[in-house]
């Protein structure tokens, strides 16, 4: 798929972080841990802390693959905090929730579909329960490692931003992932099941690094959301969550010791 930009929109390409995206994919990692050996260090610690009922509710909403409901996350920003993300979820538009729940109902079967139908019948109640579950799972699964995770995200953004300034957008885009390239005034992403031309003229494009979806790229294209490309962050090692020193080493490798020291203070 292509994110099409005009010459003026190249300046509108920006970077952001998304705590909600990280949590949603953390839930999927916990549902299929055997497929993600790079995250086993974090998984071993996180699974023992999970609040069972809250995790079950989020698992129903998020699922283990495929479509991720838009109402779970707000537009990624450089300064977006977990607290702001949770607050936005608690105020998510009911109309948008219904649309997302309808999509998930069509994509699900059995007990999950029944639970989603029950949420669709009482969306305001479901919103409150989902927001509460979000905070519970966040506190147990990602809050203990958020400092390390956020450092990796921000270090990646620093590297990419510097690459845009020195080498240009096309060169930077080609380094995001093997499936991403720049072609004919567009950021092109090779996706197995998604073919689309997204007109980003006037809206721009948000690029978001991710630690929890470190295996590939994801896109967000449906209005009113701003076109967004999630890509694997650099510097993720098997020990990123267990050893703060390994995070410091990864940052130093990405940024150089001096810049890494500034980010770590």
Image (tube, helix red, strand yellow):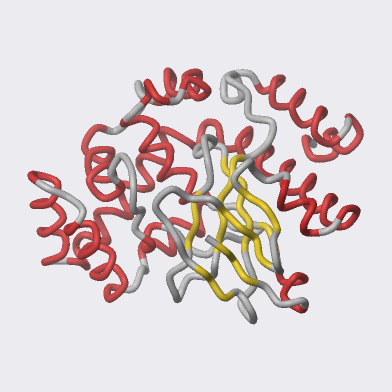
- 48 shown above or below 258: above
Instruction: Name the residue: 48% across, 50% down.
Output: 191
Asked where in the image residue 169 lies, by quadrant, the reply is bottom right
The residue at the far bottom in this view is 202
**Residue 44: percent from left, percent from top:** 42, 18
Q: In this view, does 180 lie to the left or right of 144?
A: right
Asked where in the image residue 92 lies, by quadrant, the reply is bottom left
Q: In this view, does 112 lie to the left or right of 154?
A: left
The reply to whether residue 10 is in sight is: yes
Asked where in the image residue 100 lies, by quadrant, the reply is bottom left
How many numbered circles does the render carry?
0
Q: 178 or 147: which is nearer to us? A: 178
Instruction: Name the residue: 48% across, 57% down.
Output: 85
**Residue 159: percent from left, percent from top:** 79, 44
Instruction: Name the residue: 33% across, 73% down.
Output: 93
Q: Is residue 185 left or right of residue 138?
A: right
- 12 shown above or below 233: below
The residue at the far front in this view is 184
Instruction: Name the residue: 53% across, 71% down.
Output: 198
**Residue 140: percent from left, percent from top:** 41, 33
- 53 shown above or below 205: above
**Residue 231: percent from left, percent from top:** 59, 46
Q: 118 or 85: which is nearer to us? A: 118
The reply to whether residue 81 is in sight is: no
For the C terminus, the quadrant is top right
């Amino acid at each position: 798929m292509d994110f099409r930009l005009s010459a003026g929109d190249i300046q509108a390409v920006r970077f952001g972080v998304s705590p909600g995206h990280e949590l949603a994919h953390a839930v999927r990692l916990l549902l299929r841990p055997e497929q993600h050996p790079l995250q086993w260090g974090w998984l071993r610690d996180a699974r023992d802390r999970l609040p069972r009922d809250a995790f079950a509710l989020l698992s129903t909403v998020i699922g283990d693959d495929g479509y991720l409901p838009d109402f779970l996350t707000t537009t990624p920003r450089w300064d977006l905090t977990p607290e702001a993300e949770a607050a936005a979820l608690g105020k998510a538009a009911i109309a948008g929730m219904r649309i997302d729940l309808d999509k998930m109902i069509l994509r699900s079967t059995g007990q999950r579909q029944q639970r989603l139908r029950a949420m669709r019948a009482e969306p305001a109640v479901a919103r409150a329960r989902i927001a509460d579950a979000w905070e519970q799972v966040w506190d147990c699964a990602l809050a203990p490692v958020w400092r390390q995770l956020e450092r990796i995200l921000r270090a990646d953004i620093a590297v990419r931003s510097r690459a845009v300034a020195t080498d240009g957008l096309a060169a930077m885009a080609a380094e995001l992932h093997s499936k991403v390239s720049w072609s004919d005034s567009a950021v092109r992403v090779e996706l197995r099941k998604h073919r689309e031309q997204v007109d980003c003229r006037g809206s721009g494009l948000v690029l978001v690094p991710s630690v929890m979806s470190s295996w590939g790229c994801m896109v967000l294209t449906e209005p009113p959301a701003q076109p967004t490309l999630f890509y694997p962050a650099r510097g993720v090692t098997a020990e990123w969550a267990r050893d703060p020193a390994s995070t410091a080493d990864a940052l130093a490798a990405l940024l150089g010791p001096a810049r890494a020291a500034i980010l770590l203070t």
